[in-house]
Amino acid sequence: MVEQAASERPNKIKLVLVILIACAAFSVYTNSFNGPFLFDDVVLVKDNPLIRDISNIPVFFKTDIFSHNPDAKPISNSYRPLQTATYAIDFFLWGKGPMGFHLGNLLFHIINAILVFLLIERLTRNRSLSFFVSLLFSIHPVNTQCVSYIAGRADLLVALFVFLSFKFYIDYSKVKRAPLLFLSAISYLFALYSKEAAMVILPLILFLYNVTFNKTERFKIRSYLLHISMLAVYLPTRLHALNGLAPRSLELSKIELFPRVLTSLKGLFIDLRILLLPHDLHFGRTTEVEYSLFGTAGSVLTVLGLLIFVYILRSTYTKWDKKKDMGAGIIFFGFSWFFVSMLPLLNIIPLQVFHSDNWLYLSSIGIYLAAGHIIWHAWRALDKRRIIFKYLIPLLVSAALLLYGYATVKRNGDYGDEIRFYLSSLRWRPNVKFYRVVGGLYGEKGDYENAVKHFKMGIETDKIYPSPEEVTGVYYNLGITYMRLSRFKEAEEALRKVLSSDNEALKKEASRLLSRMKK
């Protein structure tokens, strides 16, 4: 009886910690439930007729994610059928309002946070470290771009299935039971159907695990063969849905490989700063292109940072490999997790942007793990006979977690209002498209003066950051707004700007409005 009670006690503690993690995540995201549909939410959810019938789920595996949108390009590179399938399930359960979709995002996030706890505990056998990493993950404000933004669902799903696949793989490596390996491979397939980056990320994480903690399996192809075979299922369905490779004309493809990758590497260190000091979270983050190794302070710091990063990886791996220092192994694994999770996002193959905060959802786990172990090790090394040392680090960690939680609640406020959402981004970087959207939102409210103000700001921004397609829309909307204000001369000037653009549809509409004004 005594032995049974002793064995049950750790499980009860684990259950309490899991409940605390779930409660922490729920508490910081409750103010996100009333948020409206924003940006891609409108196309993917609000105006998507396919998700209104759950029987359409098989259709999602035959088309790209934007195929239902008549205004989209003929084909996109985004093949994420599970993302759309979960929207259909949300619609079936909760209806068309945004609250049900927000609830779905939060449920996935809570499950992910719990999986992080179980994964880290399995890897490190350190429950305190596991709780810290998962708690930080559950409340960190950088994750709002995945949790509070409905279209961020893909990052939640790919993380879910990467975590599951990795967990099953670790279990398999311990007991060698074939069903566990099969479950790991199937989870990988689901990760692929959630987001394309899983194709690279999960195999690299499995290889990293074998290199660090399971060396006898690291170069054995059989350790990865079943996962690789999942590509034989995924790739044909993807190629069929996208009519081949589905090339897209992306802006970053116009930049040569070296500056593209160098700029993306610079973004890694911006990411590290964001994880520590997330004071400037915003949608549509941009960065200046770096064309040479020593051309700017940014490129110099990037090179220096990479050298330090490589040194840390080399020294920690050597210490773990030769001295069997578990702490060094954990730090090596954590930093390496961050890098391999970001590797497919380094623009080796051109992407749409250099940087996006939602990319940190999966990769940040590695940084939390490495940083958490360093903090935990420092606390253990202190002389706890002195009260200040015994409580100083726990107090500082608790204060940091409270600040991160508060920042998440505050950031959710930006996602709770359309105008506030776009203005929060414009505060950090002018953007013609966002000024056009804000002006349009003010116009819908009947606040035409504010609409004109923001349309004009978009036009001024275009002089610094040219965006020909977007500024045409700004001039068109400005012309309509002037007409509503009976300022016809200014309306004519704005609409004539549209006539000099390449947008045939808007040119036709502008001509029609100009003709109407002359009557």
Image (cartoon, rainbow, N blue to C red):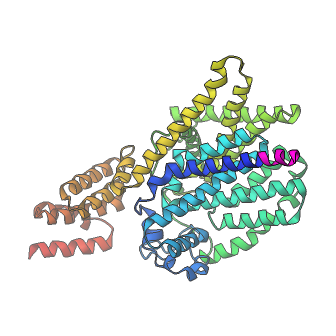
307 and 110: which is toward the camera = 110
Please give left or right for residue 190 compared with residue 415 in the image.
right
Which of the 4 quarters of the picture holds residue 173? bottom right
In the current view of this chain or complex, which residue is farthest to the front? Answer: 1
Does residue 260 appear in this view? Answer: no
Quarter location, residue 390: top right
Q: Position of residue 414 (x, y in %)?
A: 40, 50
229 lies above or below 198: below
In this rendering, the answer to whether 267 lies above or below 174 is above
User: Where does residue 197 sit, x and y in percent of width and height?
Assistant: 64, 59
The residue under the point 47% across, 70% down is: 45
Residue 309, position as x, y percentages in the image: 68, 35
Instruction: Please give the range of residues in magenta.
Output: 1-9
Give yes or no for residue 222 being in the magenta stretch.
no
Q: Observer-nearest residue: 26 or 12?
A: 12
In the image, residue 377 above or below residue 407: above
Secondary structure mostly taken by the magenta-highlighted segment of the chain? helix
Indicate the position of residue 518 as horizontal and vertical percent values: 9, 73
Q: Residue at x 78, y 65 (%)?
A: 183
**Quick one: 189 or 120, which is closer to the camera?**
120
